[in-house]
Image: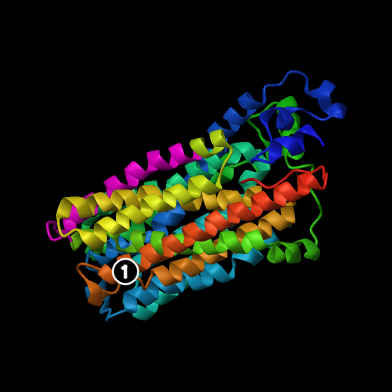
Amino acid sequence: MSKEVKASVTGIASDESVRAPTETNAETLGEINHDSIISKVDLRFLPMLCALYLFSFLDRASLGNANIAGMPKELGLHKTELNFALAIFFLSYGLLEVPSNILLKHINARYYVVFLTMIWGIITMCHGFIHNFQGLVAARVFLGIFEAGLMPACSYLMTLWYPRHKLALRVTIFFSASLLAGAFGGLLARGIMNLNGSAGYSGWRWIFIIEGLMTFVVGIIAFFCLPESPSHAYFLTPAERTALTEYIKHDSGNESTPFSWSEVTEAFKLLHTWLSAFAVFTLAVAIYSFTFFLPQIILGFGATSPTRTQLLTAPPYLFAIFVLIFAGYTSDRLKNRGWVIVTFMGIGCIGYIFLLTSLKLAPRYVGTFFIASGLWPAIALSMGWITNNLLGQTRRAVGIAIQTTVVCAGGVAGSYVYRPTDAPAFKQGHAVCLALVLAGMVVAAFQRWWLSRKNTKSVQEGEDKVLYVL
């Protein structure tokens, strides 16, 4: 049995087995330091991905800030029409996830991502010029269409740049952009609302106009800064590009294969694809409902004004950023995904218990910190976990798209968790999220047991291959 298989039984292949270059390339690669190359990638490639995801999340979540800035009254929204507008985004978003990643195998990734970013930036600006419910729905549908490709594309691209045992930390840094968007969105909205009445537009309209313009500019920057692949990395020397390409190939078992529909089908057949999808769904419902309705939840505490509420939405997200990065670092160091995910799901559950059982402002606000710092690490690691365990670029691309489609389904459900009739306590919404996250914990624990069982069976049968990450 090879050293790589033995090392993989408890999780990810050891650094020693991954780092060793193939014999045919040992002379060419010489003494190149792989950690130094990865550090360069961290500085030049990862920040651009984070910026793109930050603005995608900022644009889709800005409806929550516009909601308490007077948008429903000006548009004449009734009852659950805002919930419908939130949900319809995920319908168009979710339907295009899998086709988008299949398309990504055949087109230039950089041009594709840049095109999507610039178009959805324009659509976000258009939100500021709508005048009725029908216009809002149309804007949300088109926003979903053009944002659909970003998340799976970025997840897929990261697997081309990082070995498996270094991926969790980078995935959590990537996901931290959504937390930064949550914090930055409230603060930005608070500042933009001072433009209320400028050029005859309400403050909530300026929120969309300015955020959309910022997104468009980021898309232009990405065109010049985002490299297409490791072999096209302008910030690496030719020797470093070769070394990085070989490093990734060796880590994944030289898995690069041409596109085939059989690989697409295989991604749908794997049990752990759907176990992960269920856990991700439960987390997505909780996260999107939290993101969309945090301003109303805090406003319901009874000790804040709309202006102060915008400011109070930021601290839970900012605190969670540090916890998220710590979770990714810990997961990589321990070479463990499953138990770390279960642990952070439990932290999120504690937050919902605070919201359900306390009537005082301070404990309930503390509960929002537990929710943010528990749910975001759990879903980030869950998304990274499935990319670790789908070998073959086509299978992985489809598997990632399946997960993100499920996230969209969670977004639809999350749009209806907190109903206007349940304000200000939102007891039912908190209880639904708590139950879902508890169910996700059970499924994540079962998934780890299942993968561990398959690893043990493969070793006993003497199969010499890269095994599943636990």
Main SS of the magenta part reads helix
Direction from residue 399 to residue 130 in the image, left or right:
left
Choose top left, top right, bottom left or bottom right for residue 203.
bottom left
Evaluate whether residue 108 shows in this view: no
Q: For residue 302, which quarter of the picture?
A: bottom left
Quadrant position of the N terminus in the picture: top right
Q: Position of residue 352 (x, y in %)?
A: 31, 58
Over which residues does the magenta segment extend? 301-328
Residue lying furthest left: 303
Q: Position of residue 105 (x, y in %)?
A: 72, 56
Observer able to see residue 447: yes
Q: Is residue 395 above or below residue 377?
A: below
Q: Is residue 183 left or right of residue 68?
A: right
List the single residue furthest toward the front: 460
Colouring used for the render: rainbow
Write down the quadrant of residue 235 in the picture.
Answer: top right
Label 1, secondary structure: give it.
helix
Does residue 97 appear to the left or right of 185 in the view shown? right
The residue sitting at 27% across, 76% down in the picture is 75
Front-lying residue, 115 or 26: 26
* Other-residue count near label 1 (Cα within 10 Å), few / some / many at <14 / 14–19 / ≥20: many
- x%, y% of residue 288? 40, 62
Task: Give the farthest residue toward the top.
Answer: 31
For the residue pair 425 and 26, the one nearer the viewer reads as 425
Q: Is residue 427 above or below residue 78?
A: above
Q: Is residue 323 magenta?
A: yes
Q: Residue at x 87, y 28 (%)?
A: 24
Mark 1 = which residue? 429
Residue 285 painted magenta? no
Please tell me which residue is depicted at 16% across the width and 54% down the height of the picture: 361
Q: Amino acid at mark 1?
A: Gly
Instruction: Give the image location of residue 173, x and y in percent.
Output: 48, 41
